[in-house]
Every structure is written in C-alpha cells, then in structure tokens.
Amino acid sequence: MQNRIAVFPGSFDPVTIGHADIVNRTAGLFDKIIIAVGVNTQKKTLFSLDQRIAWLEKTFEHLTHVEVASYQGLTVDFCKSKNANYILRGLRNSSDFNYETHIAQLNTNLDSEIETVFVLTSPELSYISSTLIRDLIIHKGEYKKYLPEGIQIN
C-alpha cells in the first residue's frame, strides 16, 4: 500500500492558529504531512524564510510525522519530488473554495495522481488569514492570540 503523504503548501507569513488547526485536525488522515513553504521571488514577505520555517517547526514539533520544507516552482513538481499524492488545502469561505478549485483542477490536469483534499477551517477561525495578521503586526495591533502557542515576534 502506498503511503499517504500530503503537502500543505503556503507562504505562512506568518503561521496562524488557522494553519495549526488544519494540520492538527488532519494529522491522523496522513502518514506524513509536509508543510511546504513556497518561495516566490515576485512576492514580498514580512518574515524571512528561515523565520517562517522555524515557527512552523516549533508549532508542529508535537507531531512526529510532520516535516517542514521550502520549495520553488510548481507545487505538483514538489509533490512528485517528495512522493506525495495529496495536496492539503484549508478553506475559510466560498471565495477560498472558488479560488482553490481552479488551482486544484489545474494541478489535476498537470498530474492526475495527485489529489487535492479540501478541509473546512473551524468556524471560529474562518476569518483569520496571514494577510490580516500581518496587518495587525505592522500596525501594532493585538495579534498574539492569532499565532500558535510559543510563536514570538520581535
């Protein structure tokens, strides 16, 4: 039987309690989850790649079958390089669904053996996004309750 390996791609700039919710709730579904921090030279991030990877490793240190890696290029190519047959995506709302459906269909067209798995965000976390949390951080708003336990921003 083939291992169930999932890739959870994103920028995680920063990691939020919403990301943690998705991984923690799906951890039992997969033999391994690879949290894949996408490196896009066209996208400006607030936090360094090393910082984001360190936060993700800290957040998921309790899950021995979760690893963190960075990648460039197409997510399906990264999946193939890791023998992953699933892409894990969290959905907060119908806008996410519409956007992610198009990406999932393209990925299926690129490689029909990689299946996208959508997981609904817990309702109480559905308004949280890295973009909103970055804005709180930049403007010195109260952001700490939206970060996983143990994550410190200096």
Image: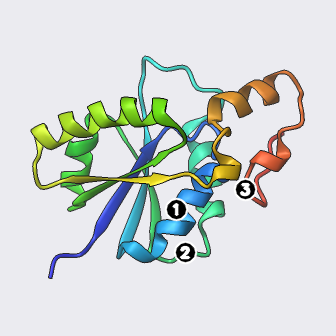
Q: Mark 2 or mark 3, which is nearer the start of the sequence?
A: 2
Q: Amino acid at mark 1?
A: Val
Q: Nearer the viewer, residue 114 or 71?
A: 114
Task: Classify mark 3: residues with Cα within 10 Å, few (<14), some (14-19) or many (20+).
Answer: many
Colouring style: rainbow
In percent of the image, x 63 and y 46: which residue is there? Answer: 15
Q: Which mark is residue 148?
A: 3
Q: Amino acid at mark 2?
A: Leu
Residue 44: x percent and y percent?
55, 20
Asked if residue 12 lies left or right of residue 94, the reply is right
Mark 1 residue element? helix
Q: Which mark is residue 11?
A: none
Residue 148: x percent and y percent?
72, 56
Q: Nearer the viewer, residue 146 or 101?
A: 101
Q: CA distance from mark 1 to mark 2?
A: 9 Å
Mark 3 residue element? loop
Tell me if residue 122 comes above or below residue 102 in the rendering.
Answer: below
Q: Which mark is residue 63?
A: 2
Q: CA distance from mark 1 to mark 3?
A: 12 Å
Mark 1–mark 2 contact, CB under 8 Å? yes
Q: Which residue is mark 1?
A: 23
